[in-house]
Amino acid sequence: MDKDGLKAFFNPKSIAVIGVSRKPEKIGYQLLRSLIMSGYQGPIYPINPKANEIQGLKVYPSITAIKDYVDLAIIAVPAPIVPRVLEECGKKGVKNTIIISGGFKEVGGEGVKLEREVIEIARKYKIRVMGPNCLGVYNPHTKLDTLFLPPEKALRPKKGNIAFISQSGAMGVAFLDWLAMEEIGLSVFVSYGNKADIDEVDLLKYLMNDENTKVITMYLEEIANGREFIEIAKKVSVKKPIVAIKAGRTEAGVKAASSHTGALAGKDEIVSAALKKAGMIRAYDTHELFDYARALAAGKIAFGENIAIVTDGGGAGVMAVDKLTDNVRGVGLKLAELKEETIEKLRRILPPFAIAHNPIDLTGNATPEMYRKVLEIVTNDPKVDGIIAIVLIHPPMMNETIVDQIEEIFRKSEKPILIAATGGTPTQKILLEYQRRGIPSYPEVERAVKAMSALVERGRFLKKIFKK
Amino acid sequence: MDKDGLKAFFNPKSIAVIGVSRKPEKIGYQLLRSLIMSGYQGPIYPINPKANEIQGLKVYPSITAIKDYVDLAIIAVPAPIVPRVLEECGKKGVKNTIIISGGFKEVGGEGVKLEREVIEIARKYKIRVMGPNCLGVYNPHTKLDTLFLPPEKALRPKKGNIAFISQSGAMGVAFLDWLAMEEIGLSVFVSYGNKADIDEVDLLKYLMNDENTKVITMYLEEIANGREFIEIAKKVSVKKPIVAIKAGRTEAGVKAASSHTGALAGKDEIVSAALKKAGMIRAYDTHELFDYARALAAGKIAFGENIAIVTDGGGAGVMAVDKLTDNVRGVGLKLAELKEETIEKLRRILPPFAIAHNPIDLTGNATPEMYRKVLEIVTNDPKVDGIIAIVLIHPPMMNETIVDQIEEIFRKSEKPILIAATGGTPTQKILLEYQRRGIPSYPEVERAVKAMSALVERGRFLKKIFKK
């Protein structure tokens, strides 16, 4: 299943690090440190002609001096030396390399020529190259970590089922660090930089069959092989959802992106239409990328646009309805019309003054048990396609058992349930607990509503594909 | 300056609490507890005919049994008893009462009649009434706290210069708790419930002259005296900015709001136009209310729409430009064209490969000192009206001294500077440190961009008013 020969980038049998350093301020030091700290189990061969031992490992003068098989070489030497080093990799028979070094196409002039040279050498020896000018791979499943940023400063997220591929290294790291805090797990992270060889198309092909990956997220600034990309993205989308930020969507943004990556981006309406055709879900603001991804990763799709809102705060319910039904500033979905039978069932268990029609308002008398009962009734209404549960924890009878009560229905329900709650530290703690149990939770109602719209979009695509 | 007689609601000389209880699960217990815990310095007179002492305080059988002057009475007895209690307040000569109790207009039928009765009694005795069905007031400056939610469960924000008045109690508490976590200070919080007497107009009039208040925020579901409201709001806006969420803006939202508060709301386009005419800044999504308010509270306004973006991550810069210049999904402002002189000055201090035109990209070579120098140059460019500084802390030479470096320019600059950074716990810690020093900071670029648009809107309004 690895006809493109990418497996060694994600699960290498052995690793050489070319350009290790003794000095902690150097990339070549931090790179090795991350690899060791991640707990990678295979052999690591550091390479530096002027050292014998670094960080407790034996150092080799060159890659050709290593007797054993090298599955992946990570290159962090100055750009002008990269071609020579790559040539040596070729002679050694290394088939996968990550070129961390910058100073190529992204700086223009000489850099462009240097990158072309690198590619020619790679072709000659049939070496697959990731980068240059990238961070490489972080794979918590195989404990591979080629990121030269110290894990104390740029936290790494835990194991999970969302893949994240980022054209921008800095953007990638900012997201990783945030994901770690939010305890959102990743299947793998890839920063592929200038994509001289390996690009989005290669990565999508690989991730399509990656068992650990249920959802793919992407940060893109330009798409190189547009037609091929859309073709493969469509294939992947049928199997698993892709959520993407495509930055550089305004004229000024495109200009900014082109001075940043040296790449040109197309008209945004065309991009948008193409992504949509491929079944991809587009994220715009920063938080949307993983807000959508974790809703999708929960595995429950909305096969219609009729949404029920359950709340214990009237105001928050009104704000959710506004965002849900507004076509301009909101997502343009519908407030589900509950069946008469559902409303009657709700009335039977709700306290007086509570509101039994959609948005269902349990009021300040809400209890965790009441939430469970209400969600059970609402998820069983055939006129409801998805549920947003606004669960403020301030009402007197609310407490942390709410997570258990909601989890019970969340496990049973085939329909998506998304949680929203606004509040301080106690609220954030409970939101994190939902997240740990795989229940998507959001710190404001609008984010939950937008995530629901991603589930509806996914449902529409799947219905179209499978003529359901 | 208190011709409406509202001062006792914010800074009472003495307080009676009618309906205190011995049982911690009762509102009448928690209310007294909050008052005591807040550190309120004046005399507190708890009232309950069946108790002698509660929480260490002497209990009185009725308000008329108190010999001393009562400046403010807080009423938390069952709704049907409220008229009798209010009558007693009138006889005692109490001029300010907060009726916490629910069971009035918001429940319909008998409740509507009961509320009318309450108002008649209030008129007879010239009593000003806040509520019923409200939380009352939290004023960290005078240490007044009438909120019956335990401070352990609903955290209280620190002292500050933003006033927050909320028609919804639950929404109010969710915000308060969040503000406490974010260390955003309040001048005062008011939950005024059914507004049988005191409404937005009264509160705006009072806050216009409140020295502690620099910015007013509002959560509204309907506006009762539209014309009067807009008239006073316009007067206030000239003196200090007002930011408001007006929920119930869609047809479904209006319907939801009306079952929640029993009130009817008008056409949203009309509401929007009226708010704009009054110089009010409208917030839509939850986070926008205080994102805008704290940008405005920093006291620096953008008197034009030309914005400079400074970043140490190219991707984040591109995303900010997209949000800034997009007319549909963004705020429709302009990327400032820097003067040639500015660009030359920047080139002199920036490392090679950094980008000296707007968006200015310091790249991964950014240092805290470099940020200071760049911001100094950019704030002095007359073609720049405001600056968004994206300060990712992951580049190797970045560290927490960045806050000092930025603060130096922030203090000197007459132009607004807003900070954005995405990341995990280390980033959040630094964002909080900016906030503590009064420098508005945001966890994603889009939020900083939207906040900048609020400063531009404020600038436009002031220019129009003062023909500047």
Image (spheres, coloured by chain):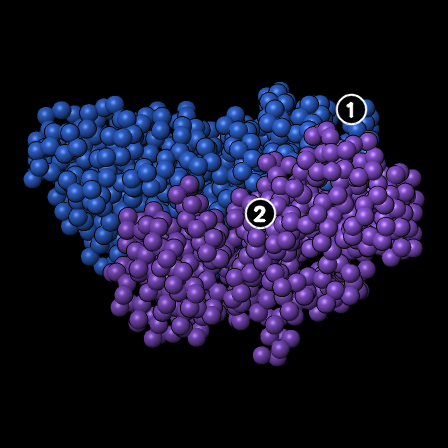
Chain colours: A purple, B blue
Which quarter of the figure has residue B344? top right
- Residue at 62% x, 77% y is A466
Q: Residues within 10 Å of mark 2 (few under 14, many from 20)?
A: many
Image quadrant for the C terminus of chain B?
A: top right
**Mark identifier at residue A442:** none
Q: CA distance from mark 2 to mark 1?
A: 36 Å
- Residue at 68% x, 50% y is A42
Q: Label 2 lies in what chain? A: A
Residue B4 in picture, x, y percent from top left: 31, 31
Q: Is residue A377 left or right of residue B69?
A: right
Of residues A2 and B51, the one nearer the viewer is A2
In this rendering, the answer to whether B394 lies above or below A431 is: above
Element type at mark 2 = loop
- Residue at 85% x, 45% y is A64
Q: Label 1 lies in what chain? A: B
Element type at mark 1 = helix
In this rendering, the answer to whether B198 lies above or below A158 is: above
Q: Amino acid at mark 2?
A: Pro
Which residue ends up furthest to the bottom in the rendered image? Answer: A467
Residue labelled with disc 1: B349
**Mark identifier at residue A157:** 2
